[in-house]
Structures are given as structure tokens and as C-alpha cells.
Image (cartoon, rainbow, N blue to C red):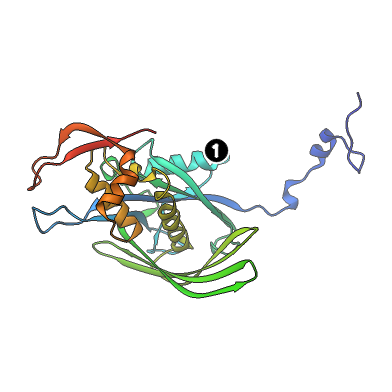
Amino acid sequence: MSELRDKNGLTEKEFLAAYRPGDYEKPSVAVDMVIFTIMDKDADNYRRLPEKELKVLLIQRGGHPYLGKWALPGGFVEPDETTEQAAERELAEETAAEGLYLEQLYTFSDPHRDPRTWVMSCSYMALADSSRINVRAGDDARSAEWFTVSLEEKLIEENRTGDSVKKKTALNLVLSSAQNSLCAEIIQEQCRSSSGTKNTYKISSSDGIAFDHAKIIAYAVQRLRGKIEYTDIALNLMPELFTLTQLQQVYEVILGRELIKAPFRRKYGILAEPTEKTTSDEGHRPSRLFRRRWL
């Protein structure tokens, strides 16, 4: 049986032998990690449950570009690994933890997003109970810190034409730690029609946040908010044992609104199963402890 030949009369073997990869400019590929956890806010009343805060891990850059600015942990993909393997490697290096929840967010490929060269970022979101994480800054970082995350969304304009709806929304991102306060405004443009939904993001201002990482963080928060209402993703942020009130607090801090206790437990109570254990030494009536129910 004769080999197949293309329009130039070449077999696949002949085509590959003559192929020159250098004819096409190739971008570098990096992974950037949005690592979320939940921590207790400092409590000023022993008899009240401590409030919860959503945190993201940032590293302070120790070299150019963006020297001294804060960025997501990450690095370049090695020639012998996939982006997921690179993400797992970076996650283990930054947190000393393995087996954390990890999902791919989006590939950010703006040719001008990195001043060094064309660098495509395959971003990932990781979720973890804070007790499992031991943060350590890499060799190329000055320090690593947890920042409290606040993302407010404000509709700027909305237009309807036929079956399509176009929205422009300002996303105001604030990241704060004990020593630092960072902020950015991202403009999200969304077009929804019968053929689907398209979102674009553009940073209009950024203070202290390197590269386009403000955009990546905002995108991750929106993903987390969207998935928390129809999946069990929130359980990845919980310790092994927890109360239903603590679980509700996690939902409230992520969604940015208070939830009514009874409807919350009807909807999300199935995600947890009771144990024989109760809380102790918390200054109030003991509560039943639950653990994740694997559905």
C-alpha cells in the first residue's frame, strides 16, 4: 500500500524531515497559580464565632520586571512536562502540600502581557484548608504573604439588541495584608446571545500588582463564586471536621452576602454528614461536627 502524499507530493516522513519550527515565532508558556484559602479574622469576643476571610497567596518579586511588586506564584513550563504537571510542581514548591484541589482557569495570551517577551499564562486555581499549607517564598521572591480578597462588581451599562445582551461591568479588586494594600479596576465586557456568552477583561488601573495578575485573580473569584452554588467545591476549603455554621460562613464570605440559615441547610446540608464529635473550648454551646460527604 502506497503512502499518502500531500498536495506537494510529500509523504508524512518527508514533510516532517523538511519542517522548520523556527519559521513560526513561539511564545514562552508559564503557569500562574491562584491559591485560595479561608482564614479566621481576629476575633475580639470569645463567645462569638470568628468571622471568615477569603485569602489569596501572593509573592513579592525579587527581580525585574515589576521588581518589588506583588504577583501570583508560578513559573515557566519545563520542556518535559504538561501545564498541569507544572502547576502541581509549583503548588508543591510554594505550599509544601500535595493533593490539593486544582483546576485550570483560562489561558491568558495577550502578546504584551509580559514586557520581557511573548509569554502565555495557563492559569490554575487551587483551594485548600489553611492548616494544610506551609507557605515558603521561592529563590526569586522577596517574601510571600496571604492577602484578604475583596471583589466588588458594579454595572456600568447594559444594551439589548435583538437576542443579544451586552454588559460592561467594573470589577474593583482590593487585596490587603497586615503590611500592604493593593488595588485594581478591571473592566469586564460580556456579550450574551443565542450562540453563547463571550467575556473580555481589560485592566484600567492597577496599583502594586504585577503583570496582568489582577485580571487573573478577578477571573478566579468569579469562577469560585459561580461554581460554589452548584457544586461541592467549597468543601475543599474546609478542615476535616467543621460545623454547618462554619460552612455557611465560608459560603457567605465567598458570595459576599448573608444567607438565611434554614434555606442554606436545606440546600447545602447534603454535602456534609454528621459525626459523633462536638466542638469544645469555644466559649459557647457545643455544636455538632460534620465531615465531607463524598457524593
For residue 130, which quarter of the picture? top left
* Side of 147 where 192 appears, left or right: right
Horizontal and vertical percent position of residue 284 = 8, 47
At label 1, which amino acid type do we have?
Glu
Q: In this view, does 263 lie above or below 202?
A: above
Q: Name the residue under label 1.
A: 81
Judge by depth and name the residue closer to the eye, 236 or 64.
236
Horizontal and vertical percent position of residue 254 = 34, 56
Q: Which residue lies furthest to the top in this view?
A: 1
Quadrant in which the N terminus appears: top right
For residue 280, which quarter of the picture? top left
Residue at the spot 9% in from the left edge and 45% down from the top edge: 285
Horizontal and vertical percent position of residue 141 = 37, 54
Q: Can residue 17 be seen in this view?
A: yes
For residue 91, which quarter of the picture? top left
Q: Is residue 145 visible?
A: no
* Side of 212 where 39 appears, left or right: left
* Secondary structure of residue under mark 1: loop
* Side of 172 where 258 appears, left or right: left
Q: How many labels were placed on the picture?
A: 1
Quadrant in which the C terminus appears: top left
